[in-house]
Amino acid sequence: MTYMNHNKPYTESYLQSILKSVKTIAMVGASPDKTKFSYGVLRVLHETGYDMVPVNPRSDVEEIRGIKVFNSLAEIDRPVDMVEVFRRPEDLLDVAKEAVAIGAKVLWGQIGVRNDEAARIAEDAGMQVVMDRCPKIELFRPFWKPKLHLKI
């Protein structure tokens, strides 16, 4: 088995191919708090056209932005292409196991979320893995190329 070297930057084509191929994204650690980064990422991805599935274990959180919240990946009622993780790096290991169990194709750890053992578990199951990156940023990166030749 050949593993991806997650110490090297991911190629733009790798990230873009993932973002173009996935349709349903389960966001583990989604928050109903509009000041949280996960809320903003969920909003932008949802408005961009992804089928977002918020996952939050709190029983009092039933929906975020009008979208039904699930308490765990196992409870989701439809296939999931990508599991995006807004949790601590040490939590990524259990989430990777759950993502494998539901047949997800991609495990994506948000900025600051990296766990090499979790990556191996996902890769052993045939999943693509991205860690320590933000899909919202990567989605719009092609439009952010600096135009250094322009006068100020």
Image (cartoon, rainbow, N blue to C red):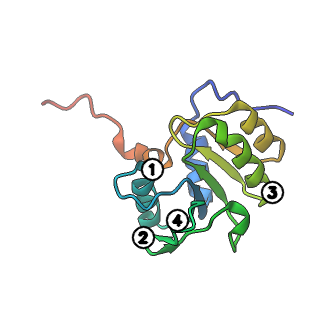
| Amino acid type assigned to the residue bearing label 3 in the image | Ala
Q: Across the whole image, how many numbered discs are drawn on residues?
A: 4
Which residue corresponds to mark 1?
A: 136
Between disc 1 and disc 4, whose residue precedes?
A: 4
Q: Quadrant of the C terminus?
A: top left
Question: Of the residues shown, which amino acid type is indicated by label 4?
Answer: Tyr
Q: Is residue 49 above or below residue 134?
A: below
Report the disc number at residue 29.
none
Q: Which residue is mark 2?
A: 65
Q: How far apart are the two marked residues, 3 and 4, measured between alpha carbons?
A: 22 Å
How far from the left and from the top, in percent, is residue 50? 52, 65
Q: Which mark is residue 50?
A: 4
| Label 4, residues with CA under 10 Å away: few <14, some 14-19, many ≥20 | some
Q: Mark 3, residues whose alpha carbon is within 10 Å: few (<14), some, or many (≥20)?
A: few
Q: Earlier in the sequence, mark 2 or mark 1?
A: 2
Residue visible at 65% across and 42% down in the picture: 91
Q: Position of residue 52 (x, y in %)?
A: 54, 65
Disc nearer the start of the sequence (2/3): 2
Mark toward the start of the polypeptide (3 vs 4): 4
Q: Is residue 118 left or right of residue 17?
A: right
Q: Are marks 1 and 4 in contact (CB under 8 Å)?
A: no
